Amino acid sequence: MFNWCFSYPPQFLRRQQVLQLYRRILRAIREVPNEDDRHYLKQWTREEFKRNKDATEEDTIKMMITHGNIQLQELKKTLQLAKS
């Protein structure tokens, strides 16, 4: 019987966090009712993630993930308000 112990490097885990955030943002954007706004937000999201794809400093990446999560929550709140 094998005892596997996986130890992922921090970069791998950060990459997973970034990809999850990207997917969650795009899913939230699907809920935007106006097609032009949806298109703009998708383009903006893609450009922001591409612009920052070469970031390597751990603290900078953590800060960007935190900022992205805050923006995602704001988008969700705005969409929720628009539905009510």
Image (cartoon, helix red, strand yellow):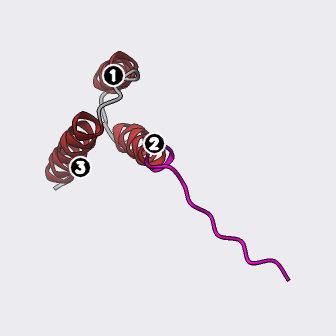
Asked which secondary structure carries label 3, the reply is helix
Q: Earlier in the sequence, mark 3 or mark 1?
A: 1
In front of the other: 15 or 20:
15
User: Which residue bears the numbered disc 2?
Assistant: 11
Q: Residue 54, position in %: x, y? A: 39, 20
Number of the front mark, 2 or 3: 2
Asked which secondary structure carries label 2, the reply is helix
Residue type at mark 1? Asn
Query: In which image quadrant can residue 58 be found?
Result: top left
Q: Earlier in the sequence, mark 2 or mark 3?
A: 2
User: Which residue bears the numbered disc 1?
Assistant: 52
Q: Residues within 10 Å of mark 1 (few under 14, many from 20)?
A: few
Q: Residue 29, position in %: x, y? A: 35, 37
Q: Is residue 6 above or below residue 25?
A: below
User: Split into 4 quadrants, where in the image is the N terminus?
Assistant: bottom right
Q: Is residue 19 left or right of residue 64?
A: right
Residue type at mark 3? Lys
Instruction: Answer whether labels 3 and 1 touch (C-beta < 8 Å).
Output: no
Q: Tell me how far mark 2 sits from mark 3, CA to CA.
A: 28 Å
Residue type at mark 2? Gln
Give me the disc on residue 76. Answer: 3
**Which residue is rendered at x = 29% and y = 32% of the image?**
57
- Bounds of the magenta span? 1-13
Number of the front mark, 3 or 1: 1
Number of the front mark, 2 or 1: 2
**Which residue is rendered at x = 46% and y = 41% of the image?**
15
Which SS type dominates the magenta stretch? loop
